[in-house]
């Protein structure tokens, strides 16, 4: 077993990028904002919108206050309302179910694929058939989540959704920078939402998000809803219901700096993931990435029947780890009344997944120690089984 590294290993690393970019660049950017005084939706946010759209390969991008805001704004642009059915992942963070509920729509929870951990297209079709048979809801939208940065099976999900008159909103909150069959994340579905929370592949120093679209109509609706439903002609005439969802200019300045090193950080995330893929004992089941796709590896998550014992072992050896997510959304208190479908894969995953340290700045010494410690655990388990 490798010697324990002298410096602490981190599950996330939100700070090292500052020294890579240079703190002076951040401070100079902040000083520029203090000088011009446009603290909300200043010129930096407009510059960021253009650069993010160009990176993703979409016509439009509108930044906003968080990933949850982005999901909600996109659904507002589609006029999601009470009586609508919105099909959502359950093995994920709460936001993709929260957004339709906030608009009065009904979340229909869909089970996960046991290998990719993403929305299972076959169960999506089953859920649609069940809602059609019940006949009391209007089919409106599907929100698949790229869990841990791993792209969903979009071709099939989009085919099923469009065949049933629904649009697809990609929850790319963990996957900015991933690639699906040659397409960059946020350019694949009818609209996409992402998050810039500090732990994301592209993270700011607070909350932030963005909505991506390819039609001017949708983008203008998002921008209106982002500021209370304001009319672009008369700022004191709110022509639709909206919210306060603006990105503050300081966060835009951070993201403009972070964007300059995103591609290198993604390469380093892939380097870390490749070592895990190739060197971890097969005892740890790895998340499957679809052919011709690249994960952004917001998290590297394995699947282990002895998850809780492994988690204790790693922490005792100075290796941070985390369970994402210990409860599927459909089992959580606020969503119990919509828990109407059996989701056995989601429930099993919540008991067996464990996320390992994943940052672009893990060096070979860190990785040697993590991998050797985990393989030592696997060897001990195998000996006991024998």
Image (cartoon, rainbow, N blue to C red):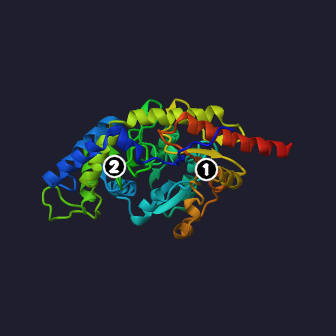
Residue at image position (34%, 48%) is: 211
Number of residues whose C-alpha sits closer than 10 Å to that of mark 1, classed few (under 14), some (14–19) or many (20 or more)? some
Name the mark nearer the viewer: 1 or 2.
1
Residue 294 in sight in this render: no
> Which one is nearer the viewer's eye here, 131 or 305?
305
Question: Which dot marks residue 347?
Answer: none
Residue 279 against residue 165 in the figure, above or below: above
Asked if residue 278 lies left or right of residue 138, the reply is right
Residue 167, given in percent of the width and then of the height, sits at 41, 48
SS for tag 1? loop
Asked if residue 373 lies left or right of residue 329, the reply is right
Asked if residue 386 lies left or right of residue 261, the reply is right
Residue at image position (47%, 42%) is: 158
Residue bearing the label numbered 2: 210
Q: Quadrant where the C terminus lies? A: top right
In primary-sequence order, the first of circles 1 and 2 is 2
> Which one is nearer the viewer's eye here, 379 or 16?
16
Residue 119, given in percent of the width and then of the height, sits at 55, 48
Residue 375 against residue 219 in the figure, above or below: above
> Which one is nearer the viewer's eye here, 200 or 240?
200
Label 1, label 2: how far apart the Cα atoms are: 36 Å
Q: Quadrant where the N terminus lies? A: top right
Residue at image position (47%, 46%) is: 161
Residue 134, given in percent of the width and then of the height, sits at 55, 62
Question: Which dot marks residue 318?
Answer: 1
Residue at image position (43%, 60%) is: 100
Residue 316 in sight in this render: yes
């Amino acid at each position: 077993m490798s010697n324990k590294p002298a410096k602490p290993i981190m599950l996330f690393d939100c700070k090292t990028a500052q020294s890579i970019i240079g703190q002076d660049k951040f401070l100079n950017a902040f000083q520029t904002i203090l000088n011009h005084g446009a603290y909300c939706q200043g010129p930096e946010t407009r510059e960021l919108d253009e650069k993010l759209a160009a990176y993703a390969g979409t016509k439009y991008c509108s930044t906003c206050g968080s990933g949850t805001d982005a999901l909600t704004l996109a659904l507002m642009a589609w006029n999601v309302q009470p009586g609508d059915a919105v099909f959502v992942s359950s093995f994920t963070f709460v936001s993709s179910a929260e957004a339709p509920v906030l608009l009065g729509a009904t979340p229909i929870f869909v089970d996960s694929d046991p290998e990719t951990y993403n929305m299972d297209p076959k169960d999506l079709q089953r859920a649609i058939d069940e809602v059609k048979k019940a006949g009391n809801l209007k089919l409106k939208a599907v929100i698949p989540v790229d869990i841990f940065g791993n792209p969903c099976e979009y071709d099939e999900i989009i085919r099923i959704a469009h065949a049933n008159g629904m649009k697809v909103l990609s929850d790319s909150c963990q996957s900015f920078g991933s690639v699906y069959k040659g397409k960059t994340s946020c350019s694949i579905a009818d609209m996409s939402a992402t998050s810039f929370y500090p732990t994301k592949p592209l993270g700011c120093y607070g909350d932030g998000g963005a909505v991506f679209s390819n039609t001017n109509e949708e983008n203008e609706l998002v921008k209106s809803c982002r500021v209370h439903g304001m009319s672009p002609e008369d700022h004191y005439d709110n022509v639709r219901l909206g919210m306060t969802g603006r990105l503050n200019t300081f966060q835009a300045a951070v993201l403009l700096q972070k964007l300059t090193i995103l591609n290198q950080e993604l390469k380093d995330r892939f380097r870390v993931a490749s070592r895990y893929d190739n060197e971890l004992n097969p005892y740890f089941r790895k998340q499957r990435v679809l052919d011709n796709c690249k994960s952004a590896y917001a998290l590297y998550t394995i699947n282990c029947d002895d998850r809780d014992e492994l988690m204790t072992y790693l922490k005792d050896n100075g290796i941070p780890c985390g369970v994402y997510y210990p409860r599927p959304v459909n089992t959580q208190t606020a969503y119990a009344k919509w828990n109407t479908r059996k989701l056995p894969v989601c429930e099993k995953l919540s008991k067996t997944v464990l996320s390992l340290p994943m940052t672009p700045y893990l060096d070979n010494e860190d990785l040697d120690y993590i991998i050797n410690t985990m393989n030592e655990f696997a060897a001990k388990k195998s000996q006991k089984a024998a």
